[in-house]
Image (spheres, coloured by chain):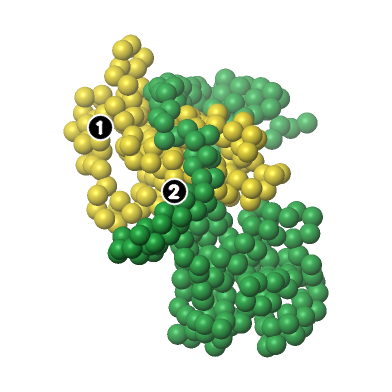
Chain colours: A yellow, B green
């Protein structure tokens, strides 16, 4: 159990960040992380010791998140993005640079789920392309093309919507 | 020597600092001659940094108590003790009489029978044999015929090994294992990236025919069913939905229509 504490505990802040960025709901995200950690504890001894603990844990979390997003979509309870509590993703801007950062999270929120997942895993959680491929259960080539499309979309979105119009434009 | 052409993947890897120094220098040189692409790459980098900065506060929040890993691990170890204590409490209540004792007894762990007991045996077999890197099976897949004849002899009826390769799981081999309800055949599968499944099959004294039932004890999921006196349980560390799909494939191969 001690190796579990050493390997998993430092990952928890990142897991929360990933879950919250995907779900856009702080409480639901922590529920998910808790669920994920319970599974990690329960399945720890079944994990292949030569495997990569980080991609294993992110895989569990990602699958839980996707299931949840699907359930929400099925039940029609998907949070409209402009009703999502703002602090769920970003702190209030305190500096010039963070004014910009609020726009970026809004733009990332508008990406399709699978593009958002790739972008977050690579850019924010700093997984390698191979690790992200394992987490998403797709070939590395698919990770690369989704990443490319996600970044392209982000650029387009950020340039053709001036800051003020963002929130109104969202469906 | 001509240089390999610069690809879109190179540009993404450049943004993510995932290139070796030589290739990075080549991309730098390429971008120097393509101001529009240089600007695109710089924009991607700026957005990446802005996104990280925006999300960083989440990771520096103090962790809520419910995400305390040591405590989650402790709680996981407790239920067995809690089970005993509540069983003891139930006994005491039953002795002092009253319906309260009865309902408490129901709430504590019941000994399982039929399909439930088969699921437990499959989960136990999984816990013992699946993590065994050295000798997960006694008879290798190459000697499947030998395994089938051994298992058929011990179960006193013809058994057959389901093929789960459509789901990405390769048959590793198997063995005969003991259960409180007689010998069972165990088949083991591996998906090549660390996930193993165990299928357990044995004769059923009760629940000779039972529809598929899913159980998740927190460590392993099981999908169990029985047909014509033979019970099957597939165990693995997968989401119930996914395991159920794989179990369906096995069930079709046994030719069960219901």
Which quadrant of the figure contains the N terminus of chain A?
A: top right
Residue B162 position, x and y percent, is: 64, 76
Q: Which of marks 2 and 1 is nearer the N terminus?
A: 2
Q: Alpha-carbon neighbours of circle 1 within 10 Å: few (<14), some, or many (≥20)? A: few
In depth, the one of B69 and B90 nearer the eye is B90
Is residue B229 shown left or right of residue A166? right
Residue B89 position, x and y percent, is: 42, 54
B216 w.r.t. A139: above or below: below
In depth, the one of B51 and B205 nearer the eye is B205
Which quadrant of the figure contains the C terminus of chain A?
A: top left
CA separation in Å, label 2 and label 1: 22 Å
| Callouts 2 and 1 in the same chain | yes
Residue hosting label 1:
A85
Name the mark on residue B241. none
Q: What is the quadrant of residue B63 in the picture?
A: top left
Residue A101 position, x and y percent, is: 35, 22
Q: Can residue B98 be seen in this view?
A: yes
Residue hosting label 2:
A64
């Amino acid at each position: 159990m001690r190796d579990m504490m050493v390997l998993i505990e430092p990952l928890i802040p990142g897991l929360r960040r990933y879950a919250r960025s995907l779900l856009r709901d702080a409480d639901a995200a922590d529920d998910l992380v808790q669920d994920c950690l319970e599974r990690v504890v329960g399945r720890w001894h079944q994990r292949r010791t030569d495997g990569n603990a980080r991609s294993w844990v992110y895989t569990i979390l990602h699958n839980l998140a996707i299931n949840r997003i699907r359930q929400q979509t099925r039940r029609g309870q998907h949070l409209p993005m402009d009703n999502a509590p703002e602090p769920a993703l970003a702190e209030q801007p305190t500096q010039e640079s963070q004014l910009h950062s609020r726009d970026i999270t809004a733009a990332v929120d508008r990406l399709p789920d699978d593009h958002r997942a790739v972008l977050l895993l690579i850019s924010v959680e700093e997984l390698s392309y191979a690790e992200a491929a394992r987490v998403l259960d797709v070939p590395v080539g698919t990770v690369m093309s989704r990443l490319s499309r996600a970044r392209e979309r982000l650029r387009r979105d950020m340039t053709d919507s001036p800051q003020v119009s963002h929130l109104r434009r969202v469906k | 020597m001509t240089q390999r052409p610069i690809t879109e993947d190179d540009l993404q890897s450049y943004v993510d600092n995932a290139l070796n120094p030589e290739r990075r220098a080549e991309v730098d040189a390429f971008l120097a001659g393509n101001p529009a692409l240089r600007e695109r790459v710089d924009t991607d980098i700026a957005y990446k940094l802005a996104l990280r900065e925006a999300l960083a506060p989440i990771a520096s929040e103090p962790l809520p108590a419910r995400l305390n890993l040591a405590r989650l691990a402790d709680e996981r170890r407790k239920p067995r003790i809690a089970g005993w204590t509540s069983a003891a409490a139930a006994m005491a209540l039953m002795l002092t009489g009253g319906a309260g004792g009865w309902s408490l007894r129901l709430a504590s762990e019941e000994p399982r029978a039929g399909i439930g007991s088969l699921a437990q045996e499959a989960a136990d077999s999984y816990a013992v044999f699946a993590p065994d890197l050295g000798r997960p099976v006694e008879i290798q897949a190459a000697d499947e015929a030998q395994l089938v004849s051994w298992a058929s002899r011990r179960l006193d009826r013809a058994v057959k090994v389901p093929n789960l390769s459509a789901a990405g799981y390769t048959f590793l081999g198997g063995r005969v294992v003991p259960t409180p309800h007689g010998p069972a055949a165990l088949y083991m599968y591996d998906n090549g990236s660390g996930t193993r499944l165990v299928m357990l099959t044995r004769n059923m004294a009760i629940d000779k025919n039972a529809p598929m039932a899913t159980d998740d004890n927190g460590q392993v999921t099981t999908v169990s069913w029985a047909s014509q006196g033979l019970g099957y349980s597939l165990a693995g560390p997968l989401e119930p939905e996914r395991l159920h799909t794989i179990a369906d494939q096995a069930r079709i191969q046994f030719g069960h229509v219901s």
